[in-house]
Image (cartoon, grey):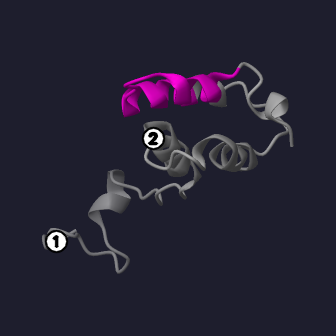
């Protein structure tokens, strides 16, 4: 993998060069970078490459933290509304009232 393929516009590279950059700024730059990843490419591989190439020497940089968070597994989605949210698996209401 080459840097030119992973970060063609240099967005991630430049984020590491900005003095005083904050985490919200890094998130914005990351999203700008992420929407440019090719459709057939594996984003996780590109992110891991960016961490090893840019973030290895700067583990405390906000962009390194953003990239590492992007590799973390997504939280499990749970249903929070509707009938399934009010009734448990045995068919009883969760609040103790009758059905």
Element on which disc 1 rests: loop
- Closest to the camera, between mark 2 and mark 1, is 2
Question: Residue at the location (77% across, 23% down)?
Answer: 8
| Direction from residue 25 to residue 10 in the image, left or right | right
Q: Position of residue 5 (x, y in %)?
A: 84, 31
Q: Work out whether residue 14 or residue 87 is closer to the camera in this orientation and state it.
A: 14
Any magenta on residue 66?
A: no
Q: Position of residue 46 (x, y in %)?
A: 73, 43
**Height in image: 63 above or below 95?**
above
Residue neighbourhood size for the residue with mark 2, other residues' Cα within 10 Å, grouped as few (<14), some (14–19), many (≥20): some
| Direction from residue 35 to residue 68 in the image, left or right | left
Q: Position of residue 99 (x, y in %)?
A: 22, 68
| Direction from residue 74 to residue 20 in the image, left or right | left
Q: Which mark is residue 98?
A: 1
Give the quadrant of the N terminus: top right
Question: Residue at the location (26% across, 75% down)?
Answer: 92
Q: CA distance from mark 2 to mark 1?
A: 55 Å
Label 2 sits on residue: 61
Q: Which comes before the other along the chain, label 2 or label 1?
A: 2
Element on which disc 2 rests: loop
- Magenta span: 10-30
Question: Residue at the location (53% across, 56% down)?
Answer: 72
Q: Position of residue 26 (x, y in %)?
A: 47, 30
Any magenta on residue 23?
A: yes
């Amino acid at each position: 993998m080459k840097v030119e393929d992973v970060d063609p516009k240099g967005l991630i590279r430049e984020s590491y060069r900005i003095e005083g950059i904050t985490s919200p700024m890094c998130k914005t730059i990351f999203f700008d970078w992420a929407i440019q990843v090719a459709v057939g490419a594996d984003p996780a591989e590109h992110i891991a490459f960016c961490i090893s190439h840019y973030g290895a020497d700067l583990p405390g940089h906000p962009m390194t933290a953003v990239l590492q968070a992007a590799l973390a597994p997504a939280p499990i989605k749970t249903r929070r509304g509707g009938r399934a949210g009010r009734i448990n698996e045995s068919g009883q209401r969760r609040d103790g009232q009758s059905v």
